[in-house]
Image (spheres, rainbow, N blue to C red):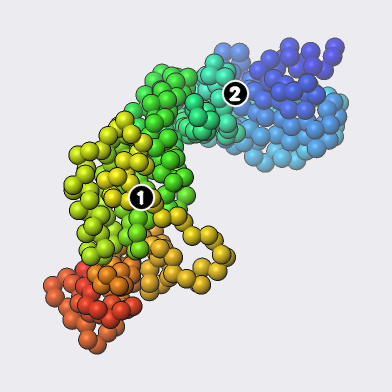
Amino acid sequence: MNDQLLVLKKFPLVVPQNRDFTLYKGFIQAGVSILRSEEFYICLHVPHYPFLNDLSIRCSWELSVILQGHEKNLNEWTKSCSSLFAYLECLQNLIMKCLEAGTAASLLHSDHHLLVKTYKHIISELEVLGLDHVLHVSSSLNEVKLQTVDQAGRNHILNLSLGMNYPSSPPVIHADLPEQLVRNIKTGSSLAAIYKSFVQQVSGLQMFWEVLDEVDRECWVIDPDNPTRKDMYRRIVIGSNVSIQITVDPFNATKRPDIKFLGSERAIIPFKKSLTEKFQFWSSDDGFIQNLKFVLGLSGFPAAPADTGHPQDLLHQGECAICFMARLEGELPSQACDNEKCGMLYHLSCLFEWLQTLPTSNKSFNYVHGECPNCSMAISCPKPSLYEN
């Protein structure tokens, strides 16, 4: 009888994955009796089928425990067995002998049947979901990565971590959505239900991403460095050593965002004044960037400087004038000199340490007062939380 027919007849759960019969996945059954049968997940790579040389096997943790110490047998069978069917028979007999002898029974936890059932359940759910939505599945099936493409052609990834008790216990969900939207994804009763809820959340965020994409195109964004789809904020340069941090509402992206000014008090006064006078005229019917320029009194946003490849040649906007870096341990410069002819920015920790070293500086409560490192005008700095006792 043909080798494939023999495998199909005796090992129906070990399924070929391609037409060349070089990859098999599924479950091998073994037990002391029909009523006491165990099922173990296996994955066989037979690169030279029907010949067994270079055959490799991956399996579930339970089966790997049983096969410990029998690696020599597995290797010898690739040379002595005349067919894949014969190899599987040898493997099945070895498993049964180990189970009968009780050498592996103590290592197989009591909910093993639940584990096998979980494997089967996940595989069947992925088939129902459709493999075109599946980006990656780990070999142990405990990590599943799904994807969808929105109306604008943007890719979105949904990561699911499946526990041993799935679906009784819901999966852990990670997605490139704002955190509150991730919490809105319904865990549901199946992977298909979770994916459907994820797609619905993505569909409802089209305007949110359109707004932020427009900001990224039209403005000089200095934070985040590489914005992701879950980031709700942008820090934008609006003038010399002056920036704003805007936070966009994902549920109502066209309304006026929360705006926080960063820079010296002198430098931000005209922008604050303009916002105070015009914020009530923000119109969701107009473009987001157009509204933002209007309320800030800008004719346009500064463009990002060209990358010369020599960042030391000049101090870029948003960089600390002490360490010459934009980001220090994840933080951007937040302290600024009030001298309108200076306006240099500093990281809180950089400025604090600088002022600490000056003999002319003095401390008052949680502040240190001294001279600006750039223009020598008076400047104050609160003590960073890092230095609190």
In which quadrant will I find the N terminus? Answer: top right
Quarter of the figure that contains the C terminus: bottom left
- Asked which quadrant contains residue 78, the reply is top right
- Nearer to me, 114 or 278: 278
Q: Which residue is pictured at 33% across the width and 67% down the height?
A: 345
Please provide percent x and percent y for residue 334: 30, 62
| Left or right: 208 in relation to 310 | left
- Where is 234 relative to 118, above or below? below
Q: Which of marks 2 and 1 is nearer the N terminus?
A: 2
Residue type of the residue flagged with mark 2: Asp
Q: Which of 280 and 214 is in front in this view?
A: 280
Residue 204, percent from left and from top = 38, 26
**Closer to the camera, 356 or 278?**
278
**Residue at the spot 33% in from the left edge and 70% down from the top edge:** 344
Specify the label residue 299 is tagged with. Answer: 1
Cβ atoms under marks 2 and 1 closer than 8 Å:
no
Could you tell me if residue 27 is visible in this image? yes
Q: Does residue 82 appear left or right of residue 124 in this picture?
A: right
Q: Which residue is drawn at 57% across and 19% down?
A: 130
